[in-house]
Amino acid sequence: MSPSPVGETRERVDGANWKPREKGTLCFIIENGKILLIEKKRGLGAGKVNGPGGRIEVGETAEQGAIRETQEEVGLTPTGMEWAGELSFQFRDGYSLHVELYRASGWTGELRETDEAKPFWCSTSEIPYGRMWADDEQWMPRLLAGEKFRGWFEFDGDRMEWFRMEVA
């Protein structure tokens, strides 16, 4: 994708002075060739498939936020947590978000649907990219391969206009 202007006065998402409006986290439990995904029921990305996650609360680390959000959204406590990467998003409407991603190799608890998410297990070879944000296809294979990475993405609504990825 070629760079496309997001706004004359807005800092490029991969620029030194870019600051996100919010910070969030995502957690992907991966075990035995399967990954836990959710169909998001509300908020940013409602109706799309993603991993459990959300905003980091004041006083908690990104990893603590990933664990809490997974517990709240699907009833599981992820174990064997590993930092996988970070993603920075700039939307044409001015919204911006920085996300820390985690891989988990196990869990405790009982999987359940909540008012935020409908969870489901999926084969890592059958990721439903057509139901996900456009950026997921750029970084998900790296997550599944056990790599650590950084990504920068610019969107106009649901349409990805530009991205850049690198090894972390």
Image: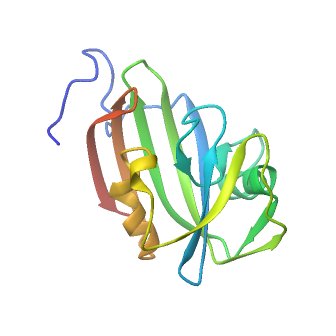
What residue is shown at x 45% (from left), y 76% (from top)?
146
| Image: 38 above or below 141 | above
What residue is shown at x 42% (from left), y 37% (from top)?
89
Horizontal relation, residue 98 to residue 145: left or right: right
Pick the front one: 119 or 144: 119
Q: Position of residue 140 (x, y in %)?
A: 42, 62
Q: Position of residue 5 (x, y in %)?
A: 21, 24
Q: Residue furthest right?
A: 109
| Image: 125 above or below 139 | below
Query: Which quadrant is home to the C terminus?
Result: bottom left
| Image: 133 above or below 108 | above
Pick the front one: 139 or 118: 118
What residue is shown at x 54% (from left), y 57% (from top)?
101
Pick the front one: 3 or 44: 44
| Colour scheme of the rendered structure | rainbow
**Number of numbered discs overlaid on the protein picture:** 0
Query: Which quadrant is home to the N terminus?
Result: top left
Image quadrant in which you'd find residue 40: top right
| Image: 142 above or below 152 | below
Q: Residue furthest left?
A: 2
Q: Position of residue 60 (x, y in %)?
A: 75, 48
Image quadrant in which you'd find residue 155: top left
Q: Position of residue 35 (x, y in %)?
A: 57, 69
Horizontal relation, residue 134 to residue 146: left or right: left
Horizontal relation, residue 4 to residue 81: left or right: left
What residue is shown at x 38% (from left), y 31% (from top)?
17
